Amino acid sequence: MKRVSTLIVSIAIVLIIFFPVFVIFEWAFSTIWYGTSLFPTQLGFRSFIQVIQGGLGKSLILSFTIAPLVVLFSAIISIPAAYIIGTKDIKSKKLIENLFLIPLIVPPIVSGIGILSIYTQLGLIGNYMAIVLVHMIGATPYMFRSVEASFESIDPSIEEAARVLGATRLRTILRIYLPLVTPGLLSGSVFAFSWSLNEFLLTLLLGLPNIVTLPVFLYRYVGGYYISPGPASAISVFLIVPSLFIVYLMEKYIKSEYVAGAGIKG
Amino acid sequence: MKPKVKFSVALLYLLPVVIFYSFIFVLPLILVFLQSFDLYSLGAMKPPQFTLKYYLEFFDLKGPYLESLWFSFWNSALATIIISVISFFLAIFFYFINFKGKSFISATYKIPLFIPYLISAFAWWNLLSPGGYVQRLLSVTGIVNPNTLLVNDPNGIGIIVANVWMNFPYMVLLLVGTLKMIDPTLIEASRTLGSTFWKSVFKIVLPLSMPGFLAGSILSFIGMFGAFSVAFILGASWPQYMSISIYNDVTQFSLYGIASVQSVVYMISAILITYFYTKIISKIQGERK
Amino acid sequence: MKGKVVIFVVLIALLVSLTVLADTSTTGLTGPQGPIPSWDTVVQMAKQEGSVSWYAYGAEYDKLYFDSLIPKFEKQYGIKVNFIFGDWYAFLQKLLAEQKAGQTVGDMDLVFTWSIPFNDAWNSGVVWKYPWSYVIPNARNIVDPYLLQYTDMIPTNGAFVPFIWWQVAFLYNKQMVKNPPQSWDDLMAWVKANPGKFTYCDPNAGGSGHTFLITLSEWLYGYDNYYDSMGLPYNKALGSELWNTVGPKGYSLWGYLKELQKYMYQPGFYPAGNSAAISLFSKGVVWLEPQWLDVTASWVKQGLLDPNIVGLYIPKPTMDAGGMDGLFIPYNAPHKYAAMVLANYLLSNEVQTGIVLDRGGAFPVVTGVMDKPDVIKAMQTQPYWVPFNSITNPLWLRSGLYMDELMKDWTQIIAKSQ
């Protein structure tokens, strides 16, 4: 009985997860698929060629250079905060931790229209660094929470010992703490990177017409007045294939707790 | 024992984060708030003049805005409930059962976490549109009337389906994590005393995992409540998610006044829901102790 | 104490930034003023300017076509083109923000947009008001000089030049429908006889919807009577009044649409845009709908729409022409001469012919293209064209302002009446 139900559940999971992925691949490789037929009647690479000519390379570069910067800067501003909150006992600790959740609770469109006004006046629409800043809004809470959790788990007597031995606070942080909080930094970086790669609405509002990241590039084919399923799917394949690798690799090598929370990409 | 530190000292370390969020987050919210009263103009130049007319427009019972807010709420809430049920059973499955190929299945269900929302939404739009595979399957098997719209429909069916697919992995992960924190001897004891597997699950596992699970589900709900891309691809002309309504008012009609009011209410709703939800959870936890 | 000081400083900084946002200024102003300069002077000045920024919108096939034009222009004139492809709304917002910040030198030299945002831009004062359409030689080839003074019946005073003639027609399934409604008079009867087979898209989400709407209203009340009773310039109150009044065809506009709705595909459901509508058509679910020729062309080219089922025609008396979306120069454009030279190039016979042959599904705005042999041949062999004279005889235009009103009212009266 257990065997059968296990099998049914497993098959169900595989089907439900892969069905949408399958459809995307179908569209990506189809060159003729009339609405009346169940399957494409002709396959080819035209959609891929179309998106490559349409600027896929530039979007890939933009997305994959912005994301590391977002990771770097959110780490820089999070580490001091995570240090002080994680290693010390402060009265308003809970309050501060909750405050960090607010950027994740407030719907992005709300801050978006405000930032739109500020950026237009400062001439920052379509500005690369300005977009990096905007991605940091949602990335930083994740980075902070991960790093803080790491700081929390460190025995406070370590810092005491270092102080006794004459190390300055800065030295302590750099030479002793940073290596110890690496797990938190790593998982925080995964979330921050993922957040930046997937960020869509704010980049759409504030990045056009210069900063066309992957999601905005994809939007050109699925949003607005025109829907082109072929090219949209081709772009998706570019994103899904590496993701599949990462998922199966992570399952093998990294503990799944680190993966929890990589959602909420709005 | 962690050394105590005064808040004013801590502030120094919090400064980078505080300055960052002040300008990139708090300031825009202040401007939106001011625009909702016409005290500031997000769009073209206009002399400021205090007015409540946008608020009156929003709270008009015959108007579209309250309806939009309600739709965003119940649609996301329903999706959360469905996700919770599915995730609970899947978490039990992963926690208790070991089988060959488990790590493959365990990795597979996480895939939606790594696919951008826009793409997932688009894939489901394909599957659920008239003539799409899932739509055909459902109408051929008689589960759904062939004429029923599953996407861009007034009930947001497509939105719910896509949201469930995209968010259940996160909840499963959360639940598995919570399950791991339950003392396994409790379940063993219950079985020894004669309870069936499922009875033990519902009497012991469910109550114990509730707090952690509820705390996590609120973020999932709020994420769906405030999201844009899913509603954008799968939503109908009416009713609309509030995020879509605000976006259209700003990008198509330049109606900054009403867009700001919607934004303010939207934001306050999200915060209030989160606040009361967490309060209720801690109360339940407190009573239990 | 330290903490309180820090909080204070941050608050002051926030307040200061609020004021800074209200003030920036730069200098610079270019462009001819006064009498119309000679074209040679213009080209000379343009070459001195050396570059031009062109902001355009459209579908993927438009972008591909525009991309192909850039190198040709750069080679011919030696003027560098900075081509930005985006959406018309963002362009307008950018201009308005620049104006608000007092920027007298902006980034945009030539902007491609349509009637309603142009009108918004004009009313906000961000359009360069010089009648430059009379400066550029190729504008003399415009199919109708009226189009240099008005776009969708909105006055342009020569500061707006049409560029592409996009056209809506009736798209019907050639295999399933042997007798499509030949005229607007036949539409209601056809839809009733074929329930569930007609649709039109949400007018706020797609132009095929709002062009259908305005043409329908013009037919219901009589085109000439329509604009006599409505009055130009635009009078908002007159619109709402008229559309509730029963016209010579026996319906009021809203009455007609509500009646029509009962027999449409999934009554109460309106596809969320041009693509959603043509998607239903491609699936054979819907057999008749108003649709853009260029969208049809794109879907056929992409292998999404079986050309064997594509039937396109203009119901009698006609379908509103356009929009003939076009180009304007912002008030703070730093390269106004180069913008004019580029606009002139875009109106050249070569570029306009390319719109028909390369891009497909759109008509030229200049004369001297439609009678070329390869154009005639293309229009006969490709499935996504209608005979040109079916649109020009008679030639009906959309009124941008009444159309805008229709779009807003439609959401209240039709969409929400479920």
Image (tube, helix red, strand yellow):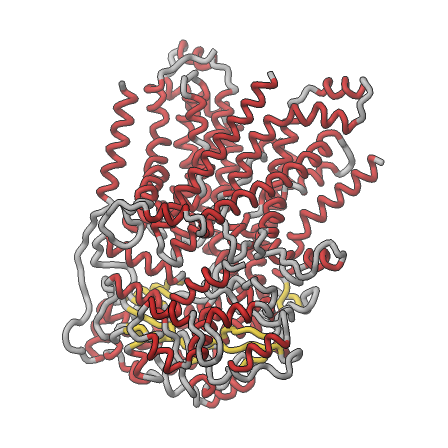
The percent position of residue A259, horizontal first and vertical second, equals 58, 35
- Residue B200 visible: yes
Q: Quadrant of the C terminus of chain B?
A: top right
Residue lying at 40% horizontally and 52% vertically, measured from the top left: A205
**Closest to the observer: C135 or A266?**
A266
Image quadrant assignment for residue A164: top left
Decide: is C159 above or below C29. below
The percent position of residue A247, horizontal first and vertical second, equals 62, 41
Residue C172 left/right relative to A64 = right
The percent position of residue C127, horizontal first and vertical second, equals 25, 66
**Closest to the observer: B244 or C232?**
C232
Give the residue furthest to the top: A164
Image quadrant assignment for residue A42: bottom right
- Residue C320 visible: no
Residue lying at 44% horizontally and 54% vertically, measured from the top left: A212
Decide: is C57 above or below A251. below
Image quadrant assignment for residue C3: top left
Decide: is C379 above or below A53. below
**Closest to the observer: C171 or B185?**
C171
The percent position of residue B279, horizontal first and vertical second, equals 51, 26
Residue C378 left/right relative to C30 = right
